[in-house]
Image (cartoon, rainbow, N blue to C red):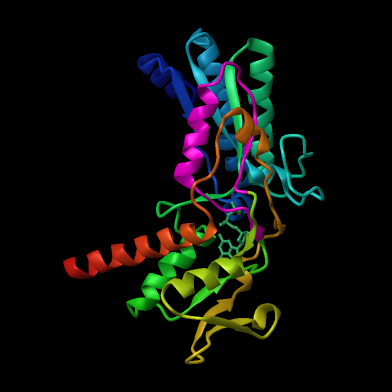
């Protein structure tokens, strides 16, 4: 995304009918460490892609999906958030994605490009990067089961997210490009849970009941039966500015795309825990 000539070359070679632009430096915390690179890859990267399609005169034949994000809403006072909710970004990642959102909309309006922004709330699966909180929790659980790790260190336990299942969200991306006209859509489940809730449900999958004791950095999640400390809070995982609460209203997508999520929060946690536990079982046979 940082190299125009290669973007042009590959689009010229493939002449795609549909482009799903998902490439990014997509980790919010990392964006505070590498803000300039994030702006380049996530913000200008989208411009390079749109310009490549335009230079190659493909605007009639190539449709573009742009991965926009609920992070644009930041700490919005309006709950739930839909396509009309004002943006209030809280990280270099979200600010780069704000540019990406508007440049996509601008190319649609200025050059008649079939370009859509999917404002997707968090979407998770066993393929989630290991440094996102859901996967970090499910991977740690399988490590704890194998005796490879004693504890899980987390940051803001009270951050709430509208967590959906990635395959459901990919279907929504595809549906956007099958419509008569390009538009922007919020994709979300309409339910919000905290990091604490995710950890509790994930441990429940392996029959451990987490109980919380203490406060702030001293808070701990312990096994209610044995008293063993399984979760600790570490300042390392807090962000300079965090988004505390996100809840999406995807009624437009439900009405116009006929989309709805199939997998809810409890099934999502189950799928992710089971996948990591199974994966590690497989590895433990090999080694
Ligand atoms: P994001 O919504 O794209 O930032 O997805 P993440 O999975 O990275 O973070 C979701 C929320 O979990 C954020 O509010 C984080 O501050 C919070 N969180 C709490 N502990 C952790 C942690 O150890 N790692 C990460 N990545 N996030 C954490």
Query: In this view of the protein, can residue 196 be seen by the observer?
Result: yes
Left or right of residue 277, residue 198 in this image: right
| In the image, residue 174 lies in the stretch drawn in magenta | yes
User: In front: 124, or 26?
Assistant: 124
Quadrant field for ligand 1: bottom right
User: In front: 279, or 37?
Assistant: 279
User: In front: 216, or 276?
Assistant: 276
| In the image, residue 180 lies in the stretch drawn in magenta | yes
Q: Position of residue 27 (x, y in %)?
A: 55, 50
Q: Position of residue 206 (x, y in %)?
A: 41, 75
Residue at the spot x=24%, y=65% of the render? 283
Q: Which of the 4 image quadrants contains residue 238? A: bottom right
Task: Look at the picture and state if 279 lies above or below 259.
Answer: below
Residue at the spot x=47%, y=79% of the render? 151
Task: Look at the picture and state if 185 lies above or below 15.
Answer: below
Q: Position of residue 87 (x, y in %)?
A: 76, 40
Residues rendered magenta in the picture: 160-189
Q: Which of the 4 image quadrants contains residue 88? A: top right
Query: In this view of the protein, can residue 287 be seen by the observer?
Result: no
Left or right of residue 116, residue 82 in this image: right
Q: Which of the 4 image quadrants contains residue 187? A: top right
Q: Position of residue 163 (x, y in %)?
A: 57, 53
Residue at the spot x=60%, y=65% of the render? 195
């Amino acid at each position: 995304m940082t190299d125009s000539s290669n973007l042009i070359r590959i689009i010229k070679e493939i002449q795609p009918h549909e482009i799903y632009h998902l490439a990014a430096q997509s980790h919010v915390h990392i964006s505070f460490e590498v803000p300039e690179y994030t702006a380049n890859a996530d913000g200008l990267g989208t411009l390079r892609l749109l310009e490549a399609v335009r230079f190659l005169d493909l605007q009639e034949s190539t449709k573009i999906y742009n991965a926009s994000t609920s992070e644009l809403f930041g700490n919005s006072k309006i709950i739930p958030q839909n396509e009309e909710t004002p943006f209030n970004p809280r990280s270099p990642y979200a600010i780069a994605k704000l540019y990406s959102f508007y440049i996509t909309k601008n190319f649609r309006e200025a050059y008649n490009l079939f370009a859509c922004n999917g404002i997707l709330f968090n979407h998770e699966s066993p393929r989630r990067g290991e440094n996102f909180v859901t996967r970090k929790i499910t991977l740690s659980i399988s490590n704890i089961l194998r005796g490879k790790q004693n504890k899980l260190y987390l940051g803001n336990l009270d951050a709430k997210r509208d967590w959906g299942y990635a395959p459901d969200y990919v279907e929504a991306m595809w549906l956007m490009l099958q419509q008569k006209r390009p538009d922007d859509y919020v994709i979300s489940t309409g339910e919000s849970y905290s990091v604490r809730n995710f950890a509790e449900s994930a441990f429940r999958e392996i029959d451990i009941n987490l109980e919380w004791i203490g406060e702030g950095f001293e808070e701990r999640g312990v096994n209610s039966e044995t008293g063993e400390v399984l979760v600790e809070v570490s300042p390392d995982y807090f962000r300079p500015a965090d988004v505390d609460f996100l809840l999406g209203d995807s009624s437009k997508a439900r009405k116009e795309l006929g989309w709805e999520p199939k997998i809810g929060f409890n099934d999502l946690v189950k799928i992710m825990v089971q996948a990591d536990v199974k994966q590690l079982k497989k590895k433990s046979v090999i080694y």
